[in-house]
Image (cartoon, rainbow, N blue to C red):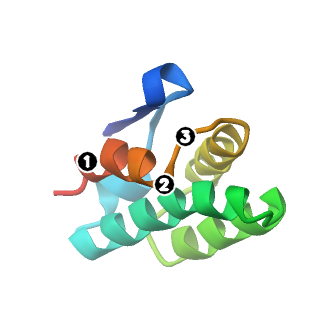
Amino acid sequence: MKKIAVMVAAGFVTLVFTATAFAQSKLPSDCNLLTQTVAATAMWRDNGVPLSKAQENVDKVLKQMPSTSEDRANWRNAVSAIYSSKVTSSQVSESLKRDCR
């Protein structure tokens, strides 16, 4: 199982978890879509989109992938952490995209 680390902006957001959605998917496009969706949460935060809507958007992407309820909970926590930080979308994207292979 692959451990995913989201560590950006000098520690504003630091999350490490096992993400079967990344590990089980055979398609790089799945990983890229999830990465970009999670990265977009910083922009949604800045534009006043409610946290619940951001989490719903990430959940929609995860439902298209081989993900577990634990994956969804972990990514919801990541979205919450992004919402409570000052991290930018590009910082999140840079942190996550290296796990897409």
- Residue at numbered disc 2: 89
Circle 3: residue type: Val
Observer able to see residue 27: no
**Image point 33% across, 64% down: which residue?**
31
**Residue 71 screen position, x and y as percent:** 55, 50
Q: Foreground residue, 16 or 90?
A: 90
Q: CA distance from mark 2 to mark 3?
A: 7 Å
What residue do we see at 45% from left, 71% from top?
A: 65
Foreground disc of the pair 3, 1: 3
User: What is the three-letter code of the residue carrying label 1?
Assistant: Asp
Q: Point out residue 81 in the picture as x, y percentages from the top left corner.
A: 66, 37
Q: Quadrant of the C terminus?
A: bottom left
- Residue 99 x/y as whole percent: 25, 48
Residue 83 visible in this rendered orientation of the protein: yes
Q: Earlier in the sequence, mark 3 or mark 1?
A: 3
- Sequence-wise, which precedes: disc 1 or disc 2? 2
Q: Where residue 99 is drawn, which disc sits there?
A: 1
